[in-house]
Amino acid sequence: MRYRGKVLKNWFIVILITLCAGCAFFWDDEKDDPVSCFEYMWSEMKYYYPGFIDSDVDWDALRDKYLPQIRKNPTSATLKRVIKEIIDTLNDAHILAVFDRDEQYPPFQEVLFSISVVDEYFNLEYVGVNYAFGRRGDVGYLYIVSFGGEEDAMIVSSWAKEITGVLKKLDDCSVLIVDIRENPGGSALNVQHIAGNFILKSYPGYARHIYKTGRAYSQYCSADEDLKKGSYTFPRPVIVLMNKGSVSSADFFGAIMSHCTDAVLVGENNAFSSIGDTEPTELPNGWIIQFGKLASELFDGEFKEGDIILMDYEVTNTSEEQKAGIDTQLEFALGLAESE
């Protein structure tokens, strides 16, 4: 089905996509041969994917490049290769192809972070579904597992509201380490609420959100959103830990902390992944292409899809260190904290 845009605005902006029967495609009418599957994927992304706005990627040119290859050799292997090459070209952390239950692209990445290793450094007082916290001497620690939200996307999750109380328990520490490594993102509302505890002022229009509303690249609608200062402000220095597993809304948090606060960022330079509202699209052959349908830019375009969030201190972990129970990034942050 194809949809046209209609804007609704509450505390967070949601753009609903409504059916336009005159331009509807019906999955049941589609053939499942490789050429038809490619055309279906290409059409879906041209209509819905906002990553082509202000992009160097020419989606029409990619069709001209790859469609003849599939027509010349119309096999599943050719289609799979083409999809993988297109995903590499788009370089968007939200895009995923699932060919069967045992194969996806990009494949699962090795996680170079373990909370069990962190537990060797900190006495964690409480572990929740989305966060854990504790301290080591004068250094406080807050690990946010994900920014996952409630079923109602228009409200701040109860666990995110609890973070204010956690920060109050830790505000007698000399330094706080906020760990968002391997955080897959989640609710932007939760990010904004938690970040509100660290910023000194509100930022009207900090984010611009964009939805595609038609086939032409110029057909889109946009709306701005505010970032509001919370009623409580954490009073101590902050170190934010990130790695390449920090994506989506976790990137939003890193960008906010980098732009709005004096927080120090430690870890791996991170490509800002801002195209969210990810949904799966099933191709006629049963393969799944998952891509985001909402693009965002922060702080007048300072952070947009693919831009790099630069760490103040670039530090990497290795799998060998993790297996040995050593967290190099955390040890660096602790050394930095103890030197404050």
Image: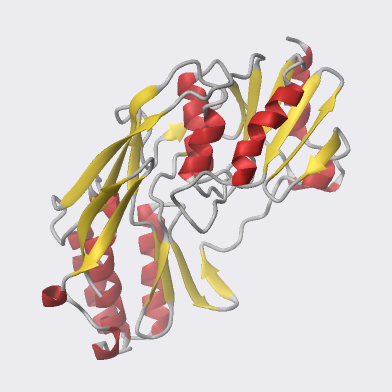
On-image quarter of the N terminus: bottom left
Above or below: residue 234 compared with residue 329 = above
When asked about the image quadrant of residue 109, the answer is bottom right
On the rendered structure, is 75 left or right of 131? left
Q: Nearer the viewer, residue 148 or 184?
A: 148
Question: What residue is at 33 percent from the left and 47 percent from the top?
Answer: 295
Circle count: 0
Residue 145, image x, y percentages: 66, 46
Q: Nearer the viewer, residue 109 or 124?
A: 124
Residue 251 appears in the picture as rendered: yes
Residue 25, image x, y percentages: 21, 79
Q: Nearer the viewer, residue 34 or 254?
A: 254
Residue 58 appears in the picture as rendered: no
Residue 268, image x, y percentages: 59, 35
On-image quarter of the C terminus: top right
Residue 66, image x, y percentages: 26, 70
When asked about the image quadrant of residue 334, the answer is top right
